[in-house]
Amino acid sequence: MKLFGKKIRKNRTLLLMLIPAFVFVIIFNYIPMGGIIVAFKDYNYNSGILGSPWVGWDNFNYLFVTGKIWELTRNTLLYNLAFIFFGIVFEVGFAIILSEITNKVFKKISQGFIFLPYFISWVVVSTIMLNIFGENGVLNSVLSTVGIEGFNIYKQAAQWPIVMVLVRLWKQTGYGTVVYLAAIAGISQEMTEAAQIDGATIWQRIRYITIPSLKPTIIIMTLLAVGNIFRGDFGMFYQLVGSNQLLLKSSDVIDTYVYRSLITTPNIGMSAAAGLYQSVLCFITICAVNYIVKRIDPDYTLF
């Protein structure tokens, strides 16, 4: 006990700095967990959370009886798997390319150009796509002038998984690239210089020094992404697709479905049930992946 008190006194400054973050997590992460009970209630505003009648699993039955939830779960999972895989490939690739550029001015311009899309709202992205690829967009105007039949991407449901992945990569790659650039900056220059002296080519340095050194960062970023693998990027999916019935089969995810259902039939309990369903799936997934990583290399686990 004395040793514990001594450690607290020794690190009291650091502990005081931790208090704001601790309070933030308690207020915005743990206290709201009490709202889970809404998933098991027929919520109404007059009675409130505690006064609303219990309905047991009825809210979950609403999700599962129609069978729609399986399609939504599949879409959400497959989209996020594609986002994670291609995101890592492009982010690491651009980070390596930028790190190898020797011209400092060109490097700064390239970094700014790649990172810029991250700050663009999905509303703006949606507007740009509509004005270019929509029925009355620039692309169709150009095609019509040369006698080629018009093309409306908003009627091509089969193409939207590719569209979604490409748009996501365009907007998010810059942020991930900066993270990996920071990791590359931490790689010992002595190793790189020694490899150059020994005659290693740029590809050999990337393969045997840069990529292995990025392995811990890649694993941590992947684990963090896996934690939300059953949560769709609501802003992206809703702004790009909206309520376009032609595209919903291939681009609808749990988040957008729940939002539309909440607007048309204000069932708060069903929305809470879907959120709990997502959270449980995410929890199981992150625990499973973390366990696998722990079995392979414990140094790279989150917990």
Image (cartoon, rainbow, N blue to C red):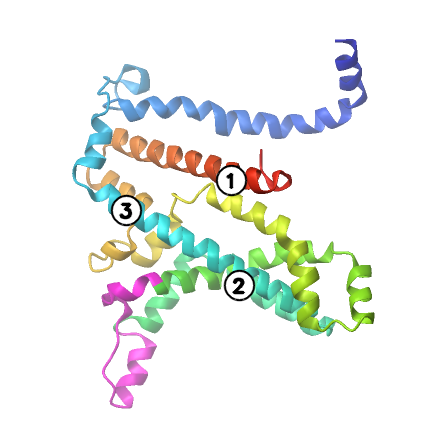
Task: Give the farthest residue toward the left.
Answer: 66
For mark 3, what is the residue? 72
For mark 1, what is the residue? 292
Characterize the local packing of mark 3: few (<14), some (14-19) or many (20 or more) Cα atoms within 10 angstroms: many
Which is more N-terminal, label 3 or label 2?
Answer: 3
Please provide the residue range marked out in magenta: 136-161
- In depth, the one of 160 and 92 nearer the eye is 92
Q: Mark 2–mark 1 contact, CB under 8 Å?
A: no
Let me know if residue 185 appears in the view: yes
Is 51 above or below relative to 166? Answer: above
Characterize the local packing of mark 1: few (<14), some (14-19) or many (20 or more) Cα atoms within 10 angstroms: few
| Nearer mark to the viewer, of 1 and 3 | 1
Amino acid under disc 1: Ile
| Nearer mark to the viewer, of 2 and 1 | 1
Q: Is residue 154 left or right of residue 291?
A: left
Task: Give the farthest residue toward the front.
Answer: 295
Q: Residue 7 location in percent, x, y?
A: 78, 19
Which is more N-terminal, label 1 or label 2?
Answer: 2
Amino acid under disc 3: Leu
Question: Looking at the image, which residue is at 68% across and 69% down?
Answer: 204
For mark 2, what is the residue? 90
Question: Looking at the image, which residue is at 36% across and 25% down?
Answer: 36
Q: Residue 283 location in percent, x, y?
A: 44, 34
Disc 3 element: helix
